[in-house]
Amino acid sequence: MSVRKIVHIDMDAFYASVEQRDDPQLRGRPVVVAWKGNRSVVCAASYEARAFGVRSAMPALRAERVCPQAVFIPPDFPRYRAVSRSVREILARHTDLIEPLSLDEAYLDVTENKTGLPTATRVASAIRQQIRNELQLTASAGVAPNKFLAKIASDWRKPNGLFVIQPEEVEAFLTPLPVGRIPGVGKVTEKHLAELSVRTVGDLRSLALAILEDRFGRYGRRLYQLARGIDDNPVVSDRPTKSISAEDTFERDLPLDGTEPMIRRLAEKVWNASRKESRVARTVVLKLKTKEFNTLTRSHTPAVPPASCDELTAIALSLCDRVDLGPQQRYRLVGVGLSNFRDTHDPGSDVLAQPMLFSE
């Protein structure tokens, strides 16, 4: 079987870089993309801000403390999505096998490419050059025989870097890496592995499959494979949507009956996003997070999927009746989602009588 050629493209500090590109006064300055507020978190940070320790998902208040000179910019997701589409158009010149992970990164299978370039490295170089020339942005790229290695490689020489892992280099590259570089190995798993005297991928490779499966279940087999650089997951283009959701954190904790305005706004946002899908969602989900940071969800699958924003909103609001923590309970976050997507021709979708449900 021929070796696959996988490229992982990762835009550098994407949201912040778009802001710096579009406003020359922001270039060279520490830019933090986030709403200011007690509950806001950092969506993105420029490399100038990262030098001060600012990171994505950090509370905005903490970002202000560690980098007082930072320029805070509220996120403009429609603009970021438009730029992301332009990046996708560049990627599509080289292959149809594109698997987006988010607005700013994607896997490409370039085992065969459209442009006739002789190597995956040349393809990755061409993509990065086109992104720079046409969009005035930079991207980092990783090239490897599989998705697992390509993603690690793209982070190796960030920002604006290219790193290649050849098939014969896999074992030597992986052996000294901390196990925390393996996807899915968080602090808890890292602690459990440390109890087995495993701190590097080389250490992990020395453990028998039976030991890993006994300790970690199905994920143990995955660890066994990744320690050997094995990842057979293909690049999947046009992956079907599993869910659409939106959530927001309140400026101050609210009682349940105070969440209604936000539920209405989020339901409208989710409904508008769902209109872009060719499949329909059967299940409506309500998510709440208490002031104590406990998360609870309630869901409902009606006999017929919601056919309008008003129906979605009504179902989401009705799910509040199934939350019974008392009137004294306060909440810090609410979310609304749609899940359980089905094809419109699926008899179980119950939409055959509503062919215009998602038409423009």
Image (cartoon, rainbow, N blue to C red):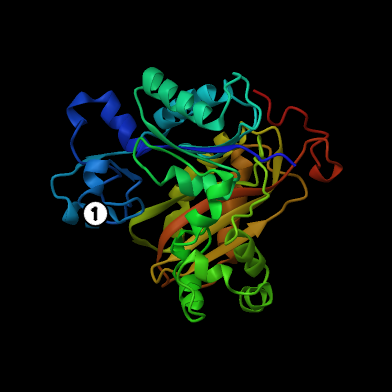
Closest to the observer, 90 or 128: 128
Residue at 82% over, 33% down? 353
Closest to the observer, 5 or 297: 5
Please name the residue that numbered disc 1 is placed on: 53
Determine whether, in the image, residue 254 is placed left or right of residue 267. Answer: left
Q: Where's residue 188, x and y in %?
A: 47, 73
Helix, strand or loop under label 1 = loop
Asked where in the image residue 309 lies, by quadrant, the reply is top right
Q: Where's residue 178, x and y in %?
A: 43, 64
Quadrant holding the N terminus: top right
Residue at 46% over, 70% down? 294
Closest to the observer, 21 or 325: 21
Quadrant holding the C terminus: top right
Asked where in the image residue 35 lies, by quadrant, the reply is top left
Residue 326 shows in this picture: no
From what the image shows, is residue 26 above or below residue 227? Answer: above
Residue 33 shows in this picture: yes
> Going by the picture, which residue comes out furthest to the left?
69
Give the residue type at disc 1: Gly
Asked where in the image residue 93 lies, by quadrant, the reply is top right
Residue at 44% over, 69% down? 187
Residue at 47% over, 43% down? 265
Q: Where's residue 27, x and y in %?
A: 21, 30
Number of numbered tags placed on the structure image: 1
Classify mark 1: residues with Cα within 10 Å, few (<14), some (14-19) or many (20+): some
> Going by the picture, which residue comes out furthest to the bottom?
195
Closest to the observer, 194 or 241: 194
Q: Where's residue 292, x and y in %?
A: 40, 72
